[in-house]
Image: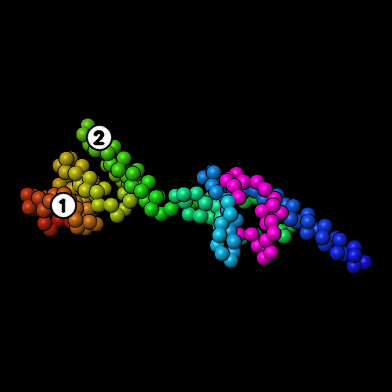
C-alpha cells in the first residue's frame, strides 16, 4: 500500500512539473529571465513569446518557487513568482509600463509637435481650430505655461485684450521664469489699463 502511494505521488508530481509555461508580452520581444532568489543573479531563458515547461524552467530548483523577470530597455521590469508544483499550465501576459522618464520625453515630443501645429494655424488666422487644439493640450498638460501663453497670443490677435491678459497672468503664475508671458502681462496692464481686471 505504501509503495502504491509513493508511486502515485511521484507520478502526480511528474505530471505537475510537465505543465506548459507560456509568457506573452506587450511590447513583444521582451527578455525572460529566471532570477535566483538568494543572489539575485539572472539567467536568460529567451524572449517573448516564450514557451517551455515548468520542468525545464525549474531545473534543479530546490525552494519550490520560480522567480521570473520580463524586461525590455525603456520599460519597468515585470516580476512573477510561481510555485514549481502548480497543477495546471501557466499562461501569462506581461503588460510592461514605459519608464517614467521615457514616457515624459515622449509626451513632451508630442506637445512640441502639437504646438508647432497651433503656430501654423495661427499664421493662416485659423484662430478657432488653434484654440481648440490648445484646449485639448491643456487637459493633458495643465501645468505647462506655454499653453496659456499661446492662448493669450490668440486672444490678443483677436483683440480680446482682457481675455489675453488673464491667459498671460495664468502662464506667468505657472512659470514666473516665462519672460514672454511676463512682458505681455505688463504691456497689457499698462497700455489698456487692465491692472485690476481678472476675468476668467
Q: Which residue is mark 1?
A: 179
Image side of residue 159 versus residue 64, left or right: left
- Label 2 packing within 10 angstroms: few (<14), some (14-19), many (20+): few
Determine if residue 166 is in view: no
Q: Looking at the image, which is closer to me, 154 or 45?
A: 45
Query: Which residue is identified by label 2?
Result: 120
Decide which of 92, 11 is in the foreground and name it. Answer: 11
Image: 197 above or below 134: below
- Dots 2, 1 in contact, CB < 8 A: no
Judging depth in this view, the residue of 159 and 183 nearest the camera is 183
* Residue placed furthest toward the bottom: 2
Across and down, in percent, residue 88 comes to 72, 54
Q: Is residue 8 left or right of residue 159?
A: right
Residue 44 locus on image (x, y percent): 58, 51
Residue at 16% from the left image edge and 49% from the top image edge = 180
Whether residue 50 is in magenta: the answer is yes
- Model colouring: rainbow
**Left or right, residue 18 beside residue 135:** right
- Magenta residues span 45-68
Which secondary structure lies at badge 1? Answer: helix
Mark 2 and mark 1 lie on one chain; the one further toward the N terminus is: 2
Residue 91 coordinates in the image, percent (x, y): 65, 50
SS at mark 2 in the image: helix
Looking at the image, which residue sits at the far right? 1
Residue 176 at least partly seen: yes
Counting from the top left corner in percent of width and height, residue 81 is at 61, 60
- What is the quadrant of the N terminus in the image? bottom right
Magenta stretch: includes residue 147:
no
Q: Residue placed at 80% from the left, 58% from the top?
A: 12
Q: Is residue 35 left or right of residue 3?
A: left
Amino acid at each position: 500500500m505504501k509503495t502504491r502511494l509513493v508511486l502515485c505521488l511521484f507520478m502526480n508530481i511528474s505530471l505537475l512539473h510537465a505543465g506548459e509555461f507560456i509568457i506573452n508580452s506587450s511590447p513583444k520581444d521582451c527578455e525572460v529571465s529566471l532570477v535566483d532568489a538568494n543572489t539575485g543573479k539572472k539567467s536568460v531563458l529567451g524572449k517573448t513569446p516564450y514557451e517551455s515547461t515548468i520542468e525545464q524552467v525549474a531545473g534543479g530548483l530546490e525552494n519550490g518557487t520560480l522567480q521570473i523577470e520580463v524586461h525590455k530597455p525603456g520599460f519597468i521590469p515585470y516580476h512573477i513568482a510561481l510555485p514549481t508544483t502548480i497543477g495546471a499550465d501557466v499562461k501569462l501576459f506581461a503588460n510592461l509600463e514605459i519608464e517614467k522618464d521615457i514616457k515624459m520625453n515622449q509626451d513632451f515630443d508630442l506637445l512640441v509637435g502639437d504646438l508647432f501645429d497651433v503656430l501654423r494655424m495661427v499664421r493662416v488666422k485659423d484662430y478657432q481650430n488653434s484654440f481648440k487644439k490648445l484646449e485639448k493640450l491643456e487637459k493633458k498638460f495643465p501645468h505647462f505655461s506655454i499653453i496659456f501663453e499661446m492662448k493669450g497670443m490668440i486672444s490678443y490677435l483677436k483683440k480680446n485684450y482682457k481675455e489675453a491678459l488673464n491667459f498671460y497672468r495664468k502662464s506667468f503664475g505657472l512659470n514666473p521664469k516665462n519672460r514672454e508671458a511676463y512682458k505681455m502681462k505688463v504691456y497689457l496692464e499698462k497700455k489698456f489699463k487692465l491692472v485690476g481686471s481678472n476675468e476668467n
